C-alpha cells in the first residue's frame, strides 16, 4: 500500500530531523507511530503527502513515488489521501456539511470549487458520512459551534469524502477529552477494519496505541527504533523508544 | 526604523541581589529611544510655541470673534440664498460619490489583495504591489483628485477616479492584512486535499474574511464621504462640499454653513447606526 524507503530530511541543511527512515503500511490496518516530541513523527506524516518536501528517499504510494510527481500529478494523488489534524483545521464559519463536501472538490474543476457546485449524489454522500460519524443532526451547524470531538468527527467525514486509500492522522486526539478520544479512535479503527482503508496515526498516548494499533512504529531522534506488530510492544520496547529524551518524556510514559 | 539587532535586548538572567521593587519590564534600548524622542519633541514644542504668536495678535478679541462665529453657525442656522431641497440634493451627490468610489475600490482592491498576500502569491509580486500601494496611500486623496483633474479637468470625473485610486490602495492593504492574519492551517489543509488555488481562496480564505471585509469597506465608505465633501470644495466636484465652500468662503454666510454642518452630522450619525447594526449581523 505505502512503502517509505530511506527517507531523510533536514530543515536547516545540517542537523538531520530524519535519518534513513523506512517502513511500510498495509491496507486495512491501523499503523501507529509513537515517539518522543520532536522525534520526527509529524515530519514523516507530512512527507507522505509532500506537505513537507523531503530531501532524500522514496515514498511509494500504490507503486508511485510521491517525490517524483509534478504539481498536477501531486494534486491528483493528494485528492485521494485523507488527512486529519490535531487542531481539526475545519473552515469554522462554514457548516459541517460544507466542510465535508470540501473533500470531493479535489477531483472537481476550479469553477465548481469557486461557485460551490455539488450534485445531489455528492450531497447525499456527505449526509451519509455525517450520519456514519454520528453527526447528522449537526449537518447545518456552523463548525465553530461544535465541540472538539464533534469537529474531529467532521474532519474524519471530510477525509472519507475524498474516497481515500489511506488516512494520515497527525495527533488526532491530542486536544480531545477521554470520551471523545474513544469515539474518534473507534471510528478510525472501524475505517481500517470495515472499509479496508489504511490508517496511519501519530500518537503520544502509548496505551491508546496498544489498544487500537495493528502495527506500531517507534521513532526516536529521526530514526525507526521499533517496527513490529502491537503484540511485540513490550514495556522494555516502550522504554527503548522513549529512551534518549528520558528527562522530558520519561514521566509522560509512566503516566500513560 | 530600528534595526533588528537593536530591538529588545532582554538580559538572559534575572538580576539578583536586594531590590525594593520588582520590575515588570527590563529597561531595553527601544523604550529608552522612545522616551528620548518624546522628550526632545516636547522641548521643541515648548520653545516654538511662543515664537509662533505674532505681535498684533490679541487673544481676547480672537476668542470673542471665534465664539461669535460658532454661535452663528450652531445656534442660528437658517437658509437665505439656497433651499433645503437643493442642499439635500447636494448631500445626496456627495453620498453617491462616496458610494461609487467605495464600490469600485473594494472590488479592485480585493483582487490586488489576493495578489499581495504572502501565502497566496509569489514574493516579488507581493512586494511590488505592496510598495506601489504604499506610495499611492502616502499621497492624500485630495491631491490625487487634483492630479487627475489635469487629465479630466476639474469636476466629478477627476473626483471619482482620484478617490477610487486612493481607496484601492487603502483597501488592498487592509484586506491583505486580514488575509495574512488567517491561520495557515486551513490553507494547508486544503492543499493536502489536492484543491486548486481558486477553490482554496473561495472555500478557505473568503469564509473567514467576510466580516472584516464588510467592516473595513464600511470604514472606507465613511472616509470617502469625508473626502467627497473636501473634494467638492477643492476640486469643484459638486455636492455638499461645493455648497459649503460657496457659503463659507464666497458669501461668508455662516448661518447656511450651520445648516450644512448639521446635515452632515445627521448623516454621520446614520452611518454610525448602520455600522453598529452591520457589526451585530456579521458577528453572528
Image (tube, coloured by chain):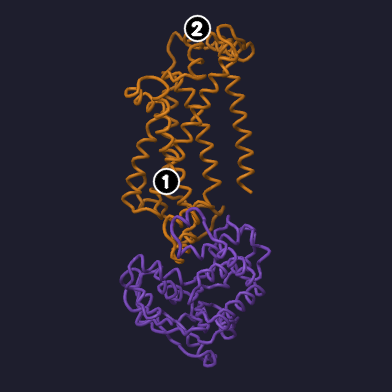
Chain colours: A purple, B orange
Q: Tell me if residue A87 comes above or below residue B40 in the rendering.
A: below
As rendered, which of B55 and A92 lies closer to the eye?
A: A92
Residue A251 seen in render:
no
* Circle 2 residue: B251
Q: Which element carries disc 1, helix, strand or loop?
A: helix
Asked if disc 2 and disc 1 are in contact, CB closer than 8 Å, the reply is no
Give percent across and percent down for residue B278.
61, 40
Classify the position of the N terminus of chain B by image quarter.
top left
Residue A194 seen in render:
yes
In the image, are marks 2 and 1 on the same chain? Answer: yes
* Mark 1 surroundings: few (<14), some (14-19) or many (≥20) residues within 10 A: many
Give percent across and percent down for residue B183.
49, 57
Tell me what residue is drawn at x 64 percent, y 13 percent.
B75
* Mark 2 surroundings: few (<14), some (14-19) or many (≥20) residues within 10 A: few
As rendered, which of A199 and A196 lies closer to the eye?
A: A196
Q: Which element carries disc 2, helix, strand or loop?
A: loop
Q: Which mark is residue B113?
A: 1
Tell me what residue is drawn at x 32 percent, y 24 percent.
B151
How many labels, in total? 2
**Residue A30 horizontal side relative to residue A140, left or right:** left
Mark toward the viewer: 2 or 1: 1
Earlier sequence position, callout 2 versus callout 1? 1
Quadrant hosting residue B40: top left
Tell me what residue is drawn at x 34 percent, y 79 percent.
A58
Give percent across and percent down for residue A220.
44, 81
Amino acid at each position: 500500500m505505502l512503502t517509505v524507503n530511506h527517507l531523510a530530511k533536514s530543515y536547516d541543511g545540517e542537523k538531520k530531523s530524519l535519518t534513513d527512515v523506512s517502513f511500510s503500511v498495509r491496507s486495512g490496518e491501523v499503523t501507529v507511530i509513537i515517539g518522543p516530541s520532536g522525534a520526527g513523527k509529524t515530519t514523516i506524516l507530512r512527507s507522505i503527502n509532500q506537505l513537507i518536501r523531503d530531501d532524500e528517499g522514496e515514498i511509494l504510494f500504490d507503486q508511485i513515488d510521491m517525490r517524483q510527481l509534478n504539481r498536477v500529478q501531486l494534486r491528483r494523488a493528494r485528492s485521494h489521501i485523507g488527512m486529519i489534524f490535531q487542531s481539526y483545521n475545519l473552515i469554522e464559519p462554514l457548516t459541517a456539511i460544507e466542510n465535508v463536501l470540501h473533500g470531493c472538490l479535489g477531483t472537481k474543476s476550479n469553477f465548481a470549487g469557486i461557485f460551490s457546485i455539488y450534485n445531489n449524489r455528492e450531497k447525499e454522500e456527505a449526509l451519509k458520512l455525517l450520519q456514519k460519524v454520528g453527526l447528522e443532526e449537526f449537518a447545518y451547524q456552523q463548525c465553530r459551534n461544535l465541540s472538539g470531538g464533534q469537529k474531529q468527527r467532521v474532519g474524519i467525514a471530510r477525509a472519507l469524502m475524498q474516497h481515500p486509500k489511506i488516512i494520515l492522522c497527525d495527533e488526532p486526539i491530542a486536544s480531545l477529552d477521554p470520551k471523545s478520544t474513544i469515539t474518534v479512535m473507534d471510528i478510525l479503527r472501524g475505517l481500517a477494519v470495515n472499509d479496508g482503508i489504511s490508517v496511519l496515526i501519530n500518537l503520544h498516548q502509548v496505551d491508546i496505541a496498544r489498544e487500537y494499533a495493528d502495527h506500531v512504529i517507534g521513532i526516536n531522534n529521526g530514526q525507526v527504533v521499533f517496527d513490529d506488530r502491537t503484540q511485540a510492544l513490550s514495556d522494555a520496547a516502550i522504554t527503548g523508544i522513549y529512551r534518549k529524551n528520558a528527562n522530558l518524556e520519561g514521566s509522560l510514559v509512566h503516566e500513560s | 526604523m530600528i534595526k533588528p539587532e537593536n530591538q529588545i535586548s532582554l538580559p538572559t538572567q534575572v538580576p539578583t541581589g536586594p531590590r525594593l521593587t520588582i520590575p515588570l519590564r527590563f529597561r531595553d534600548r527601544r523604550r529608552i529611544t522612545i522616551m528620548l524622542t518624546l522628550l526632545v519633541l516636547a522641548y521643541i514644542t515648548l520653545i516654538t510655541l511662543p515664537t509662533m504668536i505674532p505681535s498684533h495678535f490679541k487673544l481676547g478679541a480672537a476668542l470673542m470673534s471665534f465664539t461669535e462665529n460658532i454661535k452663528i453657525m450652531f445656534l442660528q442656522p437658517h437658509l437665505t440664498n439656497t433651499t433645503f431641497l437643493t442642499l439635500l440634493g447636494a448631500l445626496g451627490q456627495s453620498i453617491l460619490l462616496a458610494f461609487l468610489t467605495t464600490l469600485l475600490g473594494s472590488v479592485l482592491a480585493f483582487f490586488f489583495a489576493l495578489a499581495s498576500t504572502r501565502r497566496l502569491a509569489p514574493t516579488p509580486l507581493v512586494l511590488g504591489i505592496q510598495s506601489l500601494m504604499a506610495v499611492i496611500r502616502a499621497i492624500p486623496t485630495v491631491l490625487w483628485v487634483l492630479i487627475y483633474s489635469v487629465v479630466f479637468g476639474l469636476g466629478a470625473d477627476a473626483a471619482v477616479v482620484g478617490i477610487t485610486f486612493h481607496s484601492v490602495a487603502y483597501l488592498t492593504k487592509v484586506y491583505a492584512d486580514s488575509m495574512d492574519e488567517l491561520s495557515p492551517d486551513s490553507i494547508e489543509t486544503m492543499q493536502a486535499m489536492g484543491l486548486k488555488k481558486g477553490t482554496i481562496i473561495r472555500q478557505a480564505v473568503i469564509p473567514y474574511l467576510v466580516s472584516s471585509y464588510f467592516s473595513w469597506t464600511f470604514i472606507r465608505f465613511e472616509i470617502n464621504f469625508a473626502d467627497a465633501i473636501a473634494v467638492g470644495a477643492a476640486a469643484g466636484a459638486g455636492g455638499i462640499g461645493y455648497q459649503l465652500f460657496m457659503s463659507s468662503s464666497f458669501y461668508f454666510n455662516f448661518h447656511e454653513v450651520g445648516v450644512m454642518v448639521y446635515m452632515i452630522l445627521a448623516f454621520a450619525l446614520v452611518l454610525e447606526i448602520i455600522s453598529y447594526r452591520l457589526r451585530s449581523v456579521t458577528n453572528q
